[in-house]
Amino acid sequence: MTAKPSTTVANLRDLGGTPLPGGRTVRPGLVLRSGALDRLDLDADPVVAGLGLRTVVDLRSAPERADHPDVLPEGARLLVRDVLADKMSESRMPAAAQLKDLLADPVVAEEHLGGGKAQALFGSVYRSFVGTASAQDAYRTLLNEVADPQAGPLLFHCTAGKDRTGWGATVILALLGADEETLMAEYLSVNPAVKQAFAPMIEGFTAAGGDPDIALALIGVFPDYLEAGLDEVRLRFGSMEKYVREGLGVSDETVEALRARLVV
């Protein structure tokens, strides 16, 4: 996966270039991932302007979209699929996407997220990526769009571009044949960009007496998070292929089209 030096879109990465078995790679320029597009400025950002994006898939919740609406490249169509809708309707915890709000108050953060609660919460969220109907609808849409030549180049994103987006990238790369070591390396590769983007928030939280481990648990991604999602795939479906076919309802023909389009 290749980091793109955007000045107005956080954590922009091209899935292209990811190594696959047999000396193959993912074709560049067709599927990209990022954080939110609320600060996109094509006049000031030739990197994004040059991508020629035709489709944007926004995986965020309604409050996130209302607070930070996407700025779309001219001519791009927007598809909104709220991954966390079902998880948040059944949970009393703040939306994972809004957890950064807790960093405004170290006492509240410690109550909700201290003592390993943050890690447990993210494990639960990643399992929901696999099992809830809203997440299945979102990732079904993503795979169907990625397989469609008319939809690309395509960019999919959430707020920070690390969890909901990270799971989507993992599923795509797994279908293309990437091994587990590559999947984990690509998943973790966003950490420097995410930590840089949220550095002022982390510094403010710790300066106010907050536990830096809590901040890092929210802002970064960790192997345990992805492993929770992969374990849920094994428990519910046995394999990534069956998760895609039975859980997401994506046809074998669509998977083959996705591979034909993205593997080089």
Image (spheres, grey):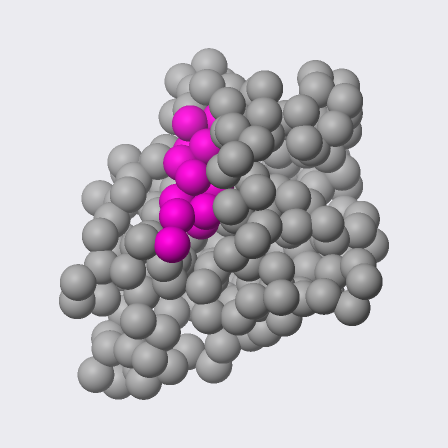
Residue plotted at (50% across, 38% down): 254
Along the horizontal axis of the image, is 251 left or right of 120? Answer: left
Please name whichever residue, 137 or 257, is drawn nearer the observer in this view of the structure: 257
Residue plotted at (57% across, 21% down): 247
Task: Please say if 21 is above or below 225.
Answer: below
**Could you tell me residue 229's position as x and y percent?**
68, 33
Which secondary structure dominates the residues rendered in magenta? helix
User: Which residue extends farthest left?
Assistant: 74
Q: What stretch is highlighted in magenta?
A: 135-149
Task: Please say if 153 is above or below 112.
Answer: below
**Could you tell me residue 10's position as x and y percent?**
44, 67
Along the horizontal axis of the image, is 66 left or right of 188? Answer: left
Along the horizontal axis of the image, is 168 left or right of 6? Answer: right
Please name whichever residue, 16 or 216, is drawn nearer the observer in this view of the structure: 16
**Could you tell me residue 143's position as x and y percent?**
48, 41
Q: In which quarter of the image is the N terminus?
A: bottom right
Magenta segment includes 153: no
Residue plotted at (69% across, 33% down): 240
How many marks do you count on the picture? 0
Q: Is residue 79 visible?
A: yes
